Image (cartoon, grey):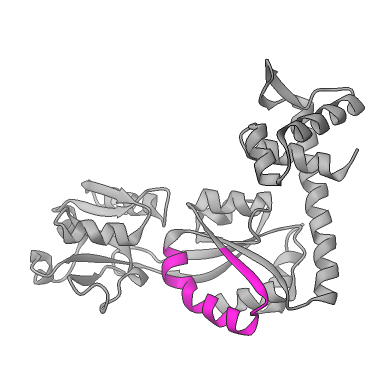
Amino acid sequence: MKLHQLRYIREVSRQGFNVSDAADALHTSQPGVSKQIQLLEEELNLQIFKRNGKRLVGLTEPGAAILQMAERVLHEMENIRRVGDEFSHEDTGDLVIAATHTQARYHLPGAVKSFMEVFPKVHLAIHQGNPTQVSEQVLSGEADIGLATEAISSYKDLVTLPCYQWNRCVVVPQDHPLIEDAPLTLEKIARYPVVTYDFAFAGGSMVNRIFAEHGLELNVALTAIDSDVIKTYVELGLGVGLLAKMAYNPDRDRNLVMLDASHLFPASTTYLGIRRDAYMRGYQYAFIQTIAPHLDRKAVDAAFRAYP
């Protein structure tokens, strides 16, 4: 059994059992990947993958167990490499952040700029997705740190730390009746079509619940994962926008008027998630404290110790 065989079965699984895509991702040949999987199956005297003819279509029951163990082995190998890098090249390496669009677009830029000024030799990449995708990228090892609102905290295999709280606003065109109709209420918002986040994002289900608790039905004209898309369609007159307050910039969004809605909804919390078995590099601690100053190394280590 060889480490590269474990990498091959992991990548084939990640690529939806497409051996060609796995070979491309691994920068090797399709026949080479197929041959190594076959050799491993022969050594173990079992099938790791279900097959339909020559195509791989899924994992067998023992294959699923082997994949879980392979993930752990490969993750520990990566941790060993990180230990070496930490002591030989402490300010050099890679850092992958998975974040929702709102976090990546509106909260992270300042922190990323500050971090890169201090750690110019660290290659930083940002992946975007919904909270579930963010969490799964961290769990799979594709990302080192995940940043998303609330849902990420439900994953038991992630150490999660609260970063900051935020609330919502309503954005409308400059001539909209809501501008002069103060104070803003849920009832007044419900009179109009609403353009807001896809309900897999940013506490969308909570927004629906708040309206329902007041006996109101939200007339959703459009949902999107991108705050800029929401604002674009509000400008076109499709409805009033309900989005994160941090996503409104008075200089950039001059065609829109922002109405504070934080008195109508409970604050949402953005969490940071890290694998429980991760080895943390020094620059990872530094990045975390850059985006959440209260999360210094001592606080992060205490959060890891709190998990059994």
Give the camera-side residue of 161 and 246. Answer: 246
Please indicate whether residue 83 sits to the left or right of residue 298 in the image.
right
In what quadrant of the picture does the N terminus appear? top right
Where's residue 157, x and y in %? 68, 52
Q: Is residue 268 in sight in this rendering?
A: no
Examine the rendering and report whether any part of residue 253 can be seen.
yes
- Against 255, residue 273 (above or below) is above
Check residue 114 for magenta coloring: yes
Q: Quadrant of residue 53?
A: top right
Looking at the picture, how far across and down is residue 297, in whole percent?
70, 77
Magenta-highlighted residues: 102-125
Image location of residue 146, percent across then percent down: 58, 60
The residue at 14%/53% (across/down) is 192
Quarter occupied by the C terminus: bottom right
Q: How many marks?
A: 0
- Identify the residue at image location x=25%, y=62%: 231
Q: Residue at x 25, y 78 (%)?
A: 250
